[in-house]
Amino acid sequence: MSIRRAWTRKEILVAFRLYCRTPFGRLHQHNPDIISLAGLLGRTPSAVAMKACNFAAFDPKLHERGVVGLSNASRADQELWAEFSENATKVAEQAESAYLELTDREGRSTDDDIVTPNDPTEIERTVKVRRVQAFFRAAVLSSYNFRCAISGLEVPGLLVASHIIPWRTSSERRADPKNGIALNALYDCAFDRGLITLDEQLCVVLSPHLEHQTACSFQRQVFDAIEGQPIMIPSRFAPDPIALAYHRDNIFLRV
């Protein structure tokens, strides 16, 4: 009779990382990424897939779509989700560190390719920033199935995981995918500079600074055409209404 091995904190972090960066429809035992991770953890692909799917049980937006996740989520899973909701940046850095420690032990991945300054404190800060950025980008883009939420563009090199509340404003929400939207580079720039925003129904609002009467044909095509258009709703981690309200009140250029 086999003995069931309990999941450690680091293993749960790695499973949570997998959940956040994998499109929801690919969280199954036949996914090559899940098979690879299972090998590193010494677990079966089905066990890893089930552990990752456990986190869907805590996402209220998935519940609205009829997705309730698996019923065997542990208390540790729930506690990690609560930690992430309160300070996504801290949990994201821990999850990336746990994964890199796991893969480095297997000789597969390190932070050696990161160009950093000589000061040890600055090196550590730079490494943490890179890890948080990587977590956020993967979580946001996978939630939108690697498409721009406004245009539907699917070119990876032109997609940005755009922060709603800016990086500099809230350290706790830097890695929170609910504080992000997948946008193409142009719309990301416009969103970041307050030229566009989203209303409470997640429809695009244009700033008066984008004057219609003086618009060139390109501007009419890429901006006027999207006014009032609803964005694509992500499979999980839908934009946080509180974050969007902050963007409308503090970043959007109304006059």
Image (cartoon, rainbow, N blue to C red):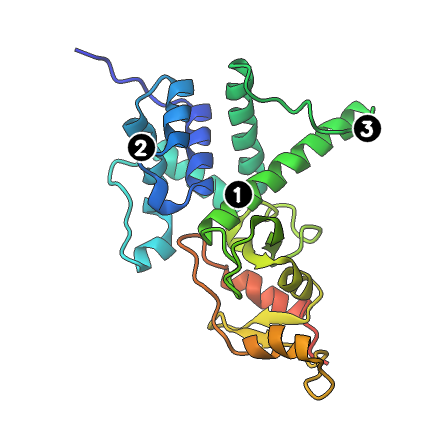
Residue 37 location (% of width, % of height) = 41, 25
For the residue pair 242 and 159, the one nearer the viewer reads as: 159
What is the distance, in whole Å, between disc 3 and disc 1 at their CAs? 26 Å
For the residue pair 55 and 154, the one nearer the viewer reads as: 154
Examine the rendered structure and indicate whether residue 103 appears above or below residue 163. above
Query: Residue beneath label 1, please?
Result: 138
Q: Is residue 74 left or right of residue 149?
A: left
Could you classify mark 1 by the number of other residues whose Cα lies within 10 Å: few (under 14), some (14-19), or many (20 or more)?
A: some
Residue visible at 42% across and 25% down in the picture: 11
For the residue pair 193 and 89, the one nearer the viewer reads as: 193
Quarter of the image for residue 114 reads top right
What is the distance, in whole Å, between disc 3 and disc 2 at their CAs? 41 Å
Give whichever of discs 1 and 2 has the lower sequence position.
2
Residue visible at 46% across and 54% down in the picture: 144
Residue visible at 68% across and 68% down in the picture: 194
Q: Is residue 46 left or right of residue 244?
A: left
Question: For residue 30, which numbered disc appears in the image?
Answer: 2
Residue visible at 59% across and 39% down in the picture: 134
Question: Element at badge 1?
Answer: helix
Q: Is residue 236 left or right of residue 241?
A: left
Residue 117 location (% of width, % of height) = 81, 28
Give amino acid for label 2: His
Question: For residue 117, which numbered disc appears in the image?
Answer: 3
